[in-house]
Amino acid sequence: MIWKYQKLLALIVFSIVTASIVAGNDPKPQVVVFPFKSNQSLQGLLQGIEDVLRSELIRSGYFIVVEQERMYEFIKETVLYNFIKIEDVDVETALPRATIVDLFARVDLKVNIRIAEKLKADFAVKGSLNQFGEKFRADIEVVNVKGKETLGALVGECDSQERISEMMEEISQQIVDVCKGASILNDIDHIQGSYQQGNFTYEETSDRLKSLSCEMPGSFLIHCALFLHYLGHHEMRDGLIEEGEEVINLFNPDSEADIRYLSLLGMDPFYELANVYSTMGKIDNAIKVYNRAIRVYPLNHTRYYKQLGVLYKREGQTELAISAFKKVLNVNPADYETRVMLASVYEAKGDISNALEQYRHSLNYATNAAESSHVKEMIKRLQSKKGVEKK
């Protein structure tokens, strides 16, 4: 009879696992919550706080949380190895849990990662709780175990002991968001890699990226990936514009991660989006994008000013074009192309003297005979105009 129940149970488990595989469900990432560090007066609160954090992470539905006792077993081994280093010591008897936690707080990130790896965890959470008068503060560190790096440092504050639980609930959501960001980057890399290897079609890649975006709306990384995917495909121009606007709206100029991600992509969404608008004849839109980029994106300012000068010149906004070109030359006086364009704006304005001055300067920065010959022709033509002395 027992054998029949075992067989039935095995069949049920097999069916569940098979269904999960067929459905393509990915396993949830595992997170380990290491014991918190606190001053002596808060020791009684720690157990409850850690329980609240674990409960909230489980309730998020995103994680599998490593069992507390299993985690402590590995920590005791680490404390024994790093601090005691003698034989025949019963750590459980020799060191109470509070002391183990205190010692563990002193180990470095490499040890944390090594323990998390043994626990098969994808992420690790460690932190401390401190009291300042009537206020409480939690400092949390979220670690990417596979990447062997800290993903983020989170801070929570509340003004009473009764609100600590609420504070930890808010922090738990931040932890989920931080870890999702790291996981999403892996998902994006997998989708893009599969497309480049020919395993996904263009349409399938688009659908998977859009599905990912629905799962985590407002993700800067996903919208960047979609924008890059649409770039260069004329039939996807509407989608490209939509994603481009999302990217520049979501971009955080104070986020080193956002700036680093764009540099790794080797793609400037501000320039590419403005270029699309310019090609479509939507010059005002392109100008708005460039001016916004100058305010928020610390890179490529000379490129933006140069393009603004071209667009202002195209729109007949002479003074704005002159101002933009001058800002380029303030940074790079040897920019031959910008000097020639500035000279042409002065000429169109009727300011022959300044036009000649810029053409003469540009001769110093010509890189080949054709450029030099072109400028000399411009100078000769202007000098022949009535009222301009030959020099």
Image (tube, helix red, strand yellow):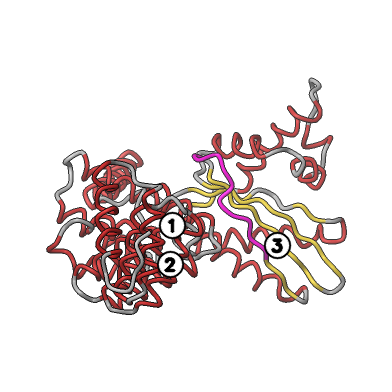
**Mark with earlier residue (1, 3):** 3
Q: Name the residue under label 1.
A: 300
- x then y, percent, for residue 132: 84, 68
Q: Nearer the viewer, mark 3 or mark 2?
A: 2
Image quarter hosting the N terminus: top left
Q: Which of marks 1 and 3 is in front?
A: 1
**Mark with earlier residue (1, 2):** 2
Q: In this view, does 202 lie above or below 248?
A: above
Indicate the quadrant where residue 128 lies.
Answer: bottom right
Question: Which residues make up the magenta segment?
Answer: 146-155
The residue drawn where x is 38% and y is 55% is: 360
The residue drawn where x is 17% and y is 42% is: 199
The residue drawn where x is 24% and y is 52% is: 374
Query: Disc number at residue 9?
Result: none
Which SS class for mark 2? helix
Q: Name the residue under label 2.
A: 293
**Front residue of 118 and 287:** 287
